[in-house]
Image (tube, rainbow, N blue to C red):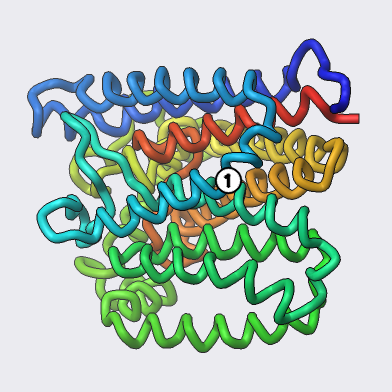
Amino acid sequence: MPKVRTTPDLILVVVTVILVIIGSMMVYSASAVWAEYRFQDPYFFLKRQLIFVGVGLAAMFVTVQVDYWRLKQMAHIILWICFALLVIVLIPGVGLVRGGAQSWLGVGAFSIQPSEFMKLAMILFLAKYVSENQKYITSWKKGLVPALSLVFIAFGLIMLQPDLGTGAVMVFTCVLIIFVAGARISHFMFLGGIGAIGFVGLIVSAPYRLQRITSFLDPWQDPLGSGFQIIQSLFAIAPGGILGLGFGHSRQKYFYLPEPQTDFIFAILAEELGFLGGSFVLLCFAVLLWRGLRIALHAPDLFGTLFATGIIGMIAIQVMINIGVVIGLMPVTGITLPLLSYGGSSLTLMLTTIGVLLNISRHIR
């Protein structure tokens, strides 16, 4: 095995901590009014978020210490556990329904979202499979079909919840891994055509998805319905200006923007901290992605390269989709902003995956 460095990538550690701190502050600011109204405790969401931060940091510490090739040995077990959870969450009376999606399993006073952990499990499995079968990656039957079959089975289970946003992030990330491994462009063009047809089918099969598309193109067609979130998000960003209204002085969190501590937390951040605050957060994400890309390029083996590529690709895709939705460039998808949005499963997953990146960085050439 390659010689282990004494310390992981310190720049990645610092930027991760900065984003977690900013996220915790903004979760409090964005949720205090709603928490006071609903739970008579303005710190309700902050206290739970800090618990999630603690669990996530503990998971990150473990994954930093456990050599990443040991995860390779456990890839199949982790994948089948996540598949089992995706099936269990669909059982009536077992899975919890929130926002029209049966995507959560209750654990005491908290809940987990199995589809979030399936993203990491699928990245791990695919990195292992492709690294061991790279000579077949240009073959349709021996390479792509076996690699993608489990991906689309998992996507189908996630869509039964339904959760198009999480499923799309998983599929795009897996396609990125296969592309980096050297699959043929012609195969991707064919898969892109199939994906476009499937996407149209998903939109036609669910009228609310068509409403999201039309509201994205012109939210003012239904300002109190499907276009409401996008309009309120833009109303939050616009007054922020260069310096913002000041921390804690958001207007849109006063019951205008629904649950602003989750998917639309960047809108509240831009309103309170302005263009400079939003730009600083984007700069932090850019640094995080740069360090992750550097780790992927210098990993000591193909598995480490593909694993790191999948992790950094997943984070980049989520950041682009979330901020694209918030500023009105994409339809509403329900994707959280990594490390900033409120949510136990998402935050724990992100800190765990960054721990894997840090572990790989201890072995880079």
Residue nearest the observer in this picture, 315 or 262: 315
Q: Which residue is mark 1?
A: 75
Residue nearest the observer in this picture, 215 or 194: 194
| Residue 223 horizontal side relative to residue 274, left or right | left
User: As displayed, is residue 225 above or below residue 17?
Assistant: below
The image quadrant where one finds the C terminus is: top right
Residue at point 64%, 32% (across, down)? 356
Q: Quadrant of residue 61?
A: top right
Q: Position of residue 58 (x, y in %)?
A: 48, 18
Residue at point 86%, 36% (across, down)? 300
- Classify mark 1: residues with Cα within 10 Å, few (<14), some (14-19) or many (20+): many
| Residue 107 horizontal side relative to residue 5, left or right | left
Q: Position of residue 156 (x, y in %)?
A: 40, 71
Does residue 252 appear anywhere in the picture?
A: yes
Q: Amino acid at mark 1?
A: Ala
User: As displayed, is residue 60 above or below residue 302?
Assistant: above
Residue at point 65%, 41% (across, down)? 72
Q: Position of residue 160 (x, y in %)?
A: 30, 69
Instruction: Kindly state the secondary structure of the residue where label 1 is placed.
Output: helix
| Residue 348 horizontal side relative to residue 124, left or right | left
Q: Quadrant of residue 67?
A: top right
User: As displayed, is residue 318 above or below residue 357?
Assistant: below
Residue at point 37%, 63% (across, down)? 158
User: As displayed, is residue 179 above or below residue 115?
Assistant: below
Q: Position of residue 322 (x, y in %)?
A: 48, 52
